[in-house]
Each structure stands twice: as structure tokens, then as C-alpha cells.
Amino acid sequence: MEKALLAGVRVIDFSWIGAGSYATKILADLGADVIKIESSTRLDSLRMAAPYKDGKPGVNRSGYFADRNTSKRSVTINMKHPRAFGLIKQLIMQSDIVANNFTPGVMDKFGLGYPAVRAMKPEIIYLAMSMQGAEGPERGYLGYGANIIALTALQHLTGLPGREPAGTGTNYPDHVPNPCHAAFAVLAALRHRRRKGKGQYIDLAQVEPTVALLGPTMLDLTVNGRNHECNGNEHPWAAPHGVYPCAGDDRWIAITAMSDAHWTALMATLGTPAWSAEPRWETIAGRYRDRVELDLLLGGVTGKWQAEILMNELQARHVPAGVVSTAEDVIKHDPQLAHRGHWVRLQHAEMGEAIYNAPPFRFSRTRVGLKSPAPLLGEHTREVCAELLGLNDQDVDELIAQEVLK
């Protein structure tokens, strides 16, 4: 197997919290040397976000932070100190990518906006991930996933009809569209530089990748004048399309019938309930008109089944179905995730053995995976100072005493 995809690529990572950190994590897990610039004077707030290992808070004990920062190195530099700029410049001169997810203007205050960094190194790839982008009347707006969900109308589409929007249950833009679009843009920029020798400025406004996921909804509004509303689990044509109770305490299964073939197989699996023979249930269109009653009738039958048994029976008949799993279920009992080697246990310097998500993709000829657990705050400061800045322990001790490396 060949070396890691991004082996030899170095990233100076100023990003923090969610989307930015996850974007650079993708690059790190692909083999890039990602050096996370931190400071004890202004912590990445994700370091203090629960859950904590063994319920004990600490800057190095957040499971949330750990999941977003695998395979990286951490260096503490007090960016407000006059000597910090020189150190950062030396790191940038030996790097390929500079990444941040600050509000526009923050990096400029450090003397590290794109024009300044480009002047240092013209071939640099510069990733900026503010909420609204570097230009326009809303460029100074500050926000994260929860704000983006509201601004893009994704919040508006979640929940039950006639009730307040329920939201996505997590800051979805921080976890999927924004980091993935950013990582893809960086990969494209690296390819462009390899072919043309030119750097890139990537100004990724985080609202835009989220809006891109709502293409059909936006088109239906702009072209047809239809404003989509909260619709619970309803689907334009699939029925049933929902989550149904199973035997046991709080056990559920998700079932979808996208065609009449699915419906026929579903009814056969459930023993062809007497009500299923009524003419009104014969077609997808007919079932759509009686969706609420259908859900009640179906729940009365699924409630007699063990969730896993019913899922396997339905999947064997090619009916889309899946058990609603708890966190413990997916870690301990999901055969597909186990087969894929999705859960990786790594030895963290303070938390001890901790569990991590592996990347959700594999390459046939290139290694991809977690190189190391999330770093302690400043864990690699001395290492990076020696390797890239040519400083010995005495030099580092002096910079620590002067509160440059803090």
C-alpha cells in the first residue's frame, strides 16, 4: 500500500471549535502534518465542552475536542505577543496551507490576512471559513452551526407540522457540509498548485455549503412558488416513511416503502395484516392520503417484533429499514461498523484509552486513518520548535518565560 495521500503536506491550523477543526482533521487523517496553533490565554472552547472522560472536566479531557482533532500536533503560541509573528512566519514558510475559521479581519490583526501571507509565500493555499465570507454587508456576522441552520432555513424544515421547528439535534453544518466542502476545496487547490504552481485563496462562507444541500427546496420556492414547511417524517411519495415502535423499552425501527414492491414485501413480512387488504392501501398514491392512520396501524404490528429481527427480515426482502440505535448500540452491536473497523481505540496522554471515529471512507491504494489521538494543549511545542524553528530547549525555556509560548 502506498503512503498516505497527503504525506508531506503541512497545515498551519488556526481554526477552532467545530467546522474548521473538522476540516483540518480530515486533512490530518489523510496524512497531512497539521500543526494546531493554540494558546492557554484563549482556549479553543471545544476543549471545555462535554462530554469529559470519566465525567472529569479538564482542557485535555473533552471527548468532543478529541473527536475533532485526531492526528494533529498542538503548539501553544501567544498571538498577542510581539515575538509571536516571527515564529508563525517561520512555520508558514515551511508549510503548504494556512487555515482559519475566524470572522473576517481577525487574521489581519495578527498580520496574517491572505495578502500578507501571500507576500510571504506566493504559492500558499489559504483557507478562510467565516460564516458569511470575507465580502458583503454581512461579512462581520459571527456564528456557528446553530446560527447557520436558522439562516439557511434548514431549521424551518425540521419538526412536526404546526409546531415550533425541532432543529437537527446537533450543529449539522459544523459536522458535514462545511468541513467536507472545505477539505474538498483544499484538495482541489493542492491539485491546481501541483499542475500550475500557483496558490489559492479559498473564501468559504459557511452558509453556502449548507444552502447547497437544500437545492430542491430552494428551486421549488423560486421556480414553483411553493414554500416548504415542517412535515415531520413525511415524504412526497414514500409511505410508510417513519419510525415505528418495537418490542422492549424504547426500541424503534425506521421503515420506508418507496414503491409498491416495497409495500408488498413489507406486508408479507408482517404477516399480511387484515387491514392491508383494503383497497385504499393498494397503491402508494392511495396510502399517501391516509398516512396518519397507516402509521398507527403499522405501529400496532411492529410493536410485536424485536427491532433487530424485523430489520433483518425487511432488509432480506430489500425493504429499506434500520434499527434506531443508541450510542452504545452503534459502538458495541453494529456489525457493519465493526466490519469496517470504524471504531478505533487510541491511547491518549491524559485520558488513557479512548474511542474515536475512523474516517468514513477507504482508498484501495492509499493508506487513510488516524495517526494519533488528539493532542494535549501544547503537547508538541518543543518538538515543533526544534524540528521547524531550530530552537533548542534553552531557547524554548526562554520563550516560555517571556510568555511567547503560552
Image (spheres, rainbow, N blue to C red):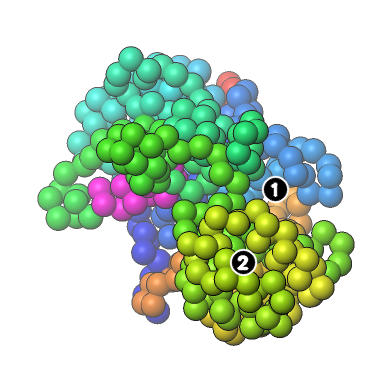
* Residue 322 on the magenta segment: no
The residue pinned by badge 1 equals 63
- The x, y position of residue 146, in whole percent, is 56, 32
Classify the position of the N terminus by image quarter: bottom left
Q: Is 137 positioned to the left or the right of 402 in the image?
A: left
Q: Nearer the viewer, mark 1 or mark 2?
A: 2
Q: Residue at x 36, y 64 (%)?
A: 5
Disc 1, SS: helix
What residue type is disc 2 on?
Answer: Ile
Classify the position of the C terminus by image quarter: top right
Q: Residue at x 48, y 21 (%)?
A: 142
* Magenta stretch, overall SS: helix
Residues rendered magenta in the picture = 178-190
Quadrant assignment, res 274: bottom right
Q: Is 129 positioned to the left or the right of 75 in the image?
A: left
- Nearer the N terminus, badge 1 or badge 2? 1
Q: Residue at x 58, y 29 (%)?
A: 39
Disc 2, SS: strand
Q: CA distance from mark 1 to mark 2?
A: 32 Å
Badge number at residue 255: 2
